[in-house]
Amino acid sequence: PPRSTLFPYTTLFRSVVMGLLLVYVIPEVTRIFVDLRRALPLPTVILIAVSDFFRSWWPLIFGGLAGLIFALGRLIRTRRGRALKDRITLSLPVVGPIAQNAATARLARTLGTCLNQGVTMLSALRIAGSVSGNVVFEQAMERIRDEASQGGGLTDPMREADIFPPITIQLVSAGEQSGRLGELLIGLARMLENDVSTRIKSASALFEPIMILLLGGMVGLMVLAVLLPIFEMSSLIG
């Protein structure tokens, strides 16, 4: 499988390994330093405190995480919860543009295909909104469909929705003026799908080294906190 597919699993595996180190390995190693009753370096003191915390409270921590995940899962099953999730997703720095372009691409491809097949505008808008995969876009398409049912165009309500990429507004306006709306929407969908694919690859290439550096840095600090007292004791012995 591609590295981008395996990345979440490798990150989870590294996190689990670090948790095991904090709960089981570090306490056994640092017990020697504690028994010596000597002043320890600050990194070692911090590591021992963090390890003791995780060792004492790990059932509560994992239970709380499991409860939070369960509660969020129940919330997301509701329409209001999905709308909140989708709004938060669209507002995120890197993930937001990907979600926006992906939803717009699905909507544009479906709407363009329906119009090219002779489906009426109102029916095409209803179908496109239902397949967008994003409640925020579904709600926007409902308002656009209401405007279209009263004889209005698509450009102004899409601009007022403030969730569509600017290129979408431009092509929809051009399509309405030229009578080639379906054709231009299909072209827009292809362009956005390519953009989503490129952004996902770039984000994966960016996140993976960042996570590796973070986890590697944490492991390095743990090793340093263990080695510092050993170096101090060896210097005293020498």
Image (spheres, rainbow, N blue to C red):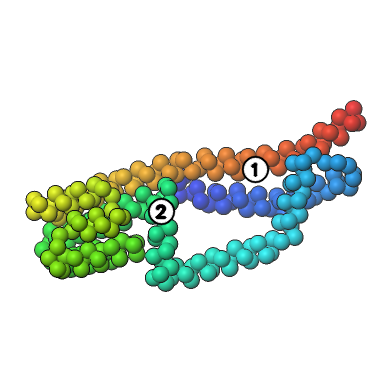
Q: Nearer the viewer, mark 2 or mark 1?
A: 2
* Residue 194 percent coordinates (x, y): 29, 45
The crowding category of the residue bearing disc 2, from other C-alpha atoms within 10 Å (few below 14, some 14 to 19, many at least 20), is few
Locate residue 144: give its quadrant.
Answer: bottom left
Locate residue 145: give its quadrant.
Answer: bottom left
* Residue 113 percent coordinates (x, y): 17, 58
Q: Give the residue type that dot 1 points to.
A: Met
Between residues 5 and 151, which one lies in front from this camera angle? 151
Q: Residue at x 12, y 65 (%)?
A: 151
Q: Residue at x 33, y 47 (%)?
A: 196
Asked if residue 202 shows in the view, the reply is: yes
Q: Give the residue type that dot 2 points to.
A: Ser
Q: Residue at x 86, y 29 (%)?
A: 235
* Residue 40 percent coordinates (x, y): 82, 41
State how far apart marks 2 and 1 are (Cα). Answer: 29 Å
Question: In terms of secondary structure, where does tag 1 sit?
Answer: helix
Locate residue 238: give its quadrant.
Answer: top right
Residue 91 - label? 2
Residue 218 - label? 1
